[in-house]
Image: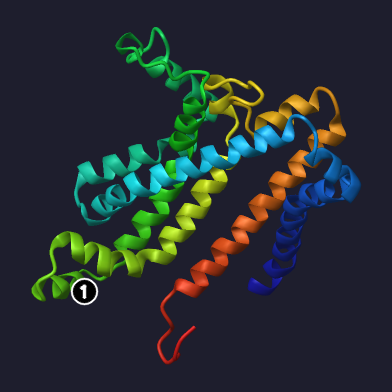
Amino acid sequence: MRSRLGGPGLVLGLGLLVFLLLPIAALGLASSPGELWAALHHPLVLPALGLTAWTSAISLLVVVVAGTPLAWMLARARGPWARAIETAVELPIVIPPAVMGIALLLVFGQRGLLGGLGVDLPFTPAAVIVAQVVVAAPFYLRSATAGLRAVDPELLLVARTLGASPRRAFLRVAVPLGLPALVNGAALCWARAVGEFGATLLFAGSFPGRTQTMPLAIYAALEADLRVATAIALVLAVVAFTTLLLARGARRWLAPPAPGEGGH
């Protein structure tokens, strides 16, 4: 049975691999180095690139600072309430980003839940950050929760018996042991924030130099010049690929050595 399924299964697997890689290869072949260099100097690109860089950096900082304690709480908690919270935290992964954009307008818009309190977020750079945090945070929380859950509670107990406070035991024991998962989650979170489109478009708009991030610049350029849009898309693809490589490398470097190994 295994031998008879091996052939068709291998063909299907290779077919899926080609299907996944072919669009990326086409993107790389569509732009010459000259076109790519020219696209980087397009009026849309540099402001969008700068805005994407600093908003995604702030979003990542917010998620890591606020999300790590939440991930630790979810990792240690047990029972139906913990599972319900963990499910709720992951909802933005399955909810379409456009729906999240509308939901954010219903909360922060002029007629929203917080609109009467004088909160004026929509169509501002702050709205870009809020949209990025909402859609990207679950990617960090999922990885961080899994990594911290794998920490042996006995190690924390030993730290406590040696006089460490709960906070110190968390920072000195749990965080270092869970660091590969934290780094991986941070990389996924940042990449998702950089690539955010739907929620940003609806909640922050697409105003060049103010709320137009790189994905929105691609959409704007697509209406005028396909070559420019393709070159910008290639820049984002390179950023995503580099992020993936760095995350995988950091995860391997930070992982504890296997039994019998002397080090990395």
x and y percent of residue 4 in the render? 70, 70
Q: Secondary structure at mark 1?
A: helix
Q: Nearer the viewer, residue 41 or 238?
A: 41
- Residue under pointer 1: 155
User: What is the quadrant of residue 154 in the picture?
Assistant: bottom left
Q: How is the image coloured?
A: rainbow
Residue 168 is left or right of residue 176, and the answer is left
Q: How many marks?
A: 1
Q: Residue at x 74, y 41 (%)?
A: 233
User: What is the quadrant of residue 113 in the picture?
Assistant: top left
x and y percent of residue 90 in the render? 40, 41
x and y percent of residue 213 in the render? 63, 32
Quarter placement of the N terminus:
bottom right
Residue 88 is left or right of residue 1, and the answer is left
Q: Is residue 115 visible?
A: yes
Q: Nearer the viewer, residue 136 or 94?
A: 136
Q: Residues within 10 Å of mark 1 (few under 14, many from 20)?
A: few
x and y percent of residue 230 in the render? 81, 38
Residue 56 is left or right of residue 10, and the answer is left
Q: Is residue 4 above or below residue 107?
A: below
The amino acid marked with disc number 1 is Leu
Q: Residue at x 54, y 25 (%)?
A: 98
Q: Is residue 32 visible?
A: no
Q: Residue at x 88, y 45 (%)?
A: 30
User: What is the quadrant of residue 194 in the picture?
Assistant: top right
Q: Residue at x 34, y 48 (%)?
A: 65
Residue 36 is left or right of residue 101, and the answer is right
Q: Is residue 211 above or below residue 132?
A: above
